[in-house]
Amino acid sequence: MDSSTQVKKQVGATVTHGASGYLTIDLAALARNYERLAAEVAPARAAAVVKADAYGLGADRVATKLYAHGCRHFFVAQFKEALHLRPLLAADAMIYVLNGLQPGNEATCAQEGIVPVINSLEQWQQWARAAHAVHHALPAVLQFDTGMSRLGVPPEERAALADLVRAENGIGVLFIMSHLACADDADSNQNGGQLAEMSRIGAEFPRLPVCFANSGGIFLGKPYHGVIARPGIALYGGPPTACRANPMEPVVRLDVAVVQTRIVPGGTRVGYGGAHVTTSETRLATIAAGYADGLPRSLSDRGAVYCDDIRLPIVGRVSMDSITIDISALPEGRFKLGSLVEVLGPNQTLEDVARDAGTICYEILTSLGHRYERQYR
């Protein structure tokens, strides 16, 4: 039974559970995406980036599924995310905090066996003090800025850090890493520039393994893979490389319930500000989701939903809790209260919605709200 059939058989549950629709998360597709990426980087290992609640899809369900399929390295952005994840995974699962630690979190981090990613001399010094306090070495990862100017040890601090690494200071460095700024653009010159800079850093920190490739970096080739690659968006079905066929399976489907239908004459204003005016008699439906549910206001008069493989354009402005669509292309009577329209699914990908909204897949995926009834397959 496919997901659309499953959703359609549960129309009554939309009302029963008070939800605005169904967000269906295909964990089997997620696992296949992980296995595809792991095969691509072998013999390197594939980690999983599960920050921002696994890109909004539920870090608890996602991480445990990936662990069952062999993943042992998990990256989050914030220490709070690591604390949530730690009791859900076995002791052999490594959890890394990309942003490193804020002062005061060192003792708990050490106690819970979580690994900070060190981005500055200051973070190194804080972690070294924590190691001294517990009287044993603590693991860490060193991140370097290779040209993105976001996170990572800057070039002017590398020599001092190299001296500290040689002196150990109670810190056991597991590997060094950096982040590619343009990996989704396979033709960008910055990719090669960052790879060259990472090679120079590797020479300054000899014998330390390298972690470099994100989703896009995996498909740039083996020189970018290092010993651990850390895919994010590709796991969840997003395209790792722009302007190329997406090799990943879709993981998410979104179906939203109809609240009301109506017929309006030509010349009728629709939505806030009367931004849309009908040119002839039009059949409209209002669906139970809006920008509070992760469907951006920028989809106003641009985006669409689908029913029976038919495109139904959004008319007027997207509201906080509702969107109006033109259903004139459907047979009369096709919709009733509680009927479902496809927002993400076979007819419309994450890329399609992101394009229509003038944004990126990451923003759409991580914004999908919790008023939908979540179904894990």
Image (tube, rainbow, N blue to C red):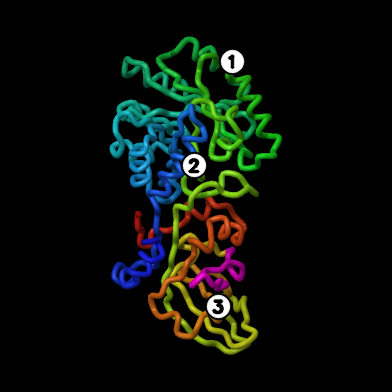
**Image quarter in which the C terminus is found:** bottom left
On the picture, is 335 further left or further right than 184?
A: left
**Which circle's residue, 1 or 2, is located before the other in the chain?**
1
Is residue 114 found inside the magenta-colored segment of the image? no
Q: Is 250 located above or below residue 271 in the figure?
A: above
Q: CA distance from mark 2 to mark 3?
A: 35 Å
Query: Of the numbered discs in the image, which one, if any, rests on residue 204?
Result: 1
Check contact, mark 2 vs mark 3: CB within 8 A. Answer: no
Residue at 48 percent of width and 22 percent of height: 175
Count residues near mark 1 (Cα–Cα under 10 Å), then give few for <14, some for 14-19, many for 20+.
few
Lower sequence index among marks 1 and 3:
1
Q: Residues within 10 Å of mark 3 (few under 14, many from 20)?
A: many
Q: Position of residue 342 (x, y in %)?
A: 47, 67
User: Can you see residue 46?
Assistant: yes
Q: Secondary structure at mark 2?
A: loop
- Mark 2 neighbour density, 10 Å: few (under 14) some (14–19) many (20 or more): many
In the rendered view, does 181 fall on the left or right side of 21?
right
Whole-number angstrom distance, CA of label 1 to CA of label 2: 28 Å
Q: Residue at x 51, y 14 (%)?
A: 207
Residue at the spot of label 3: 326
Q: Is residue 311 magenta?
A: yes
Residue that mark 2 sits on: 232
Report x, y in % for residue 206.
54, 14
- Image check: 93 left or right of 262? left
Q: Disc 2 or 3, which lies upstream in sequence? A: 2
Name above or below for residue 260 compared with residue 55: below
| Numbered disc 1: secondary structure | helix
Look at the numbered disc 3 and give the secondary structure of its residue. strand
Q: Which mark is residue 144?
A: none
* Residue type pointed to by label 2: Gly
Bounds of the magenta segment: 298-313
Amino acid type for the residue under numbered disc 3: Asp
